[in-house]
Image (spheres, rainbow, N blue to C red):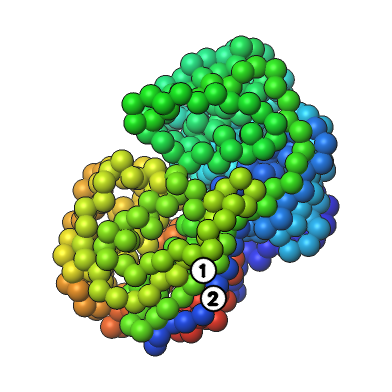
Amino acid sequence: MDGPHPISSHPTGLARLSAARSGPLSGIARAPGDKSISHRSLMLGALASGTTTVEGLLESDDVARTAAAMAAFGALVEHQGPGRWRIKGNGGFREPSDVIDCGNAGTAVRLIMGCAAGFPLTVSFTGDQSLRGRPMGRVLEPLARMGATWLGRDGGRLPLTLKGGNLRGIEYRLPVASAQVKSAVLLAGLHAEGGVTVIEPALSRDHTERMLSAFGVSLRFTPEGHGRRIALAPGQKLTGTHVAVPGDPSSAAFPLAAALVVSGSQVMVENVLLNPSRIGLFETLKEMGADLTISNRRDAGGEPVGDVTARFGALKGVEVPPERAPSMIDEYPVLAAIAAFAEGKTVMRGIGEMRVKESDRIALMARALTDNGVDVEEEPEGMIVRGTGVPPRGGASVTTHGDHRIAMSNLILGLGAEQSVTVDEPGMIATSFPSFVEMMRRLGAPIWDI
């Protein structure tokens, strides 16, 4: 991979961050590039023939792992300036000379496995302590049915070695809606005899389908129940293209959440991705009575985007429909923090996947909110937050287990709570949102190194 490494691995250089009760937040911010689309633009660029140019790429630790992996598989990957990258693919992957280390990037490793499975190569994968504890079996199972083989620890946990090539097409019904599993099967299916069909029980993120189309691949969609059937015909080739990455709604959620819970605040986040499969949090906040408006709606690179403005106001608890979970699974931690300021109970169910993210996010948010004086009930597949309509006590020091979303969610809590909230291991924030602290400070947030 040519060019300088543009990504800071630690936003502060210190061990902890603290957020104190804030005065009104105001200003205009721009969300970093969407992480899901950033990963996929690098992977499809490497699989394609010809040159792919990307603007607005999220330059985070997770995405840097994908860029390095694509270079290891034989693509020319060049950093050409802030957010601007060039990928020259050869129409396929070659066997890498070393282990592919995906760090903390769960999306990266699962989708790269799908890409690599289509080629006659052997590749080993590893990651950091958190990623090595996360299950890969749900991706490996359909890849194995297609003919790939793997050797690793029980449950398919990293480190593991995958052997690909000579894949056969399958019809695969997802046990639960999962964009990562769906994407891995579709990416493997690009080089499977007979193509593949994936049936999802509910609609999940469709960035892979949209981006495959942008790279010249034809897909056929048929509604089925609450989800759909996605068919990919065999023998299709990807051609390099230009990708404009919109702002990540999962990252935009944090400054917007801060405006909702800090008295007198008004914050706009520009260029936010508004893909229907990603706006579950915005729908939920509107149901809670949030003053949330969207302006300047437009299309960017085949994806809907707009500018989102949040203003402080009274919030009420709601019951989030479980079927909404796929469209906001990464936003439940910050929703739990917002719910601590609402009047009444906010019920979040059908979110068991949160227990196998970078951490057990249900357990960590329940503990953090409880320690900060919030009434929380933890359930096996969900949680209930009972707010009182006034700021919670705060005052706790939160153990994040290196989870970036747990850290950022609790810092947002601290901005509106009566007492400061402190989080450990803030360096992990750089995996998804390297500019988080700087952005929040520009809006007026008192977030400090300690």
Task: Relative to 160, say whether 247 is above or below.
Answer: below
Residue at image mark 1? 269
Is residue 387 visible in the rendered structure shown here?
no
Q: Residue at x 48, y 41 (%)?
A: 205
Q: CA distance from mark 2 to mark 1?
A: 6 Å
Residue at image mark 2? 28
Left or right position of 140 against 162: left
Where residue 276 appears, as percent x and y from the top left, is 45, 46
Task: Relative to 163, say whether 59 is above or below.
Answer: below
- Give the residue type at disc 2: Ile
Neighbour tally class for label 1: few under 14, some 14-19, many 20 plus, Cα within 10 Å: many
Is residue 121 visible in the rendered structure shown here?
yes
Q: Secondary structure at mark 1?
A: strand
Q: Residue at x 25, y 78 (%)?
A: 391
- Give the residue type at disc 1: Val
Which image quarter: residue 283?
A: bottom left
Spot the residue most to the bottom: 23
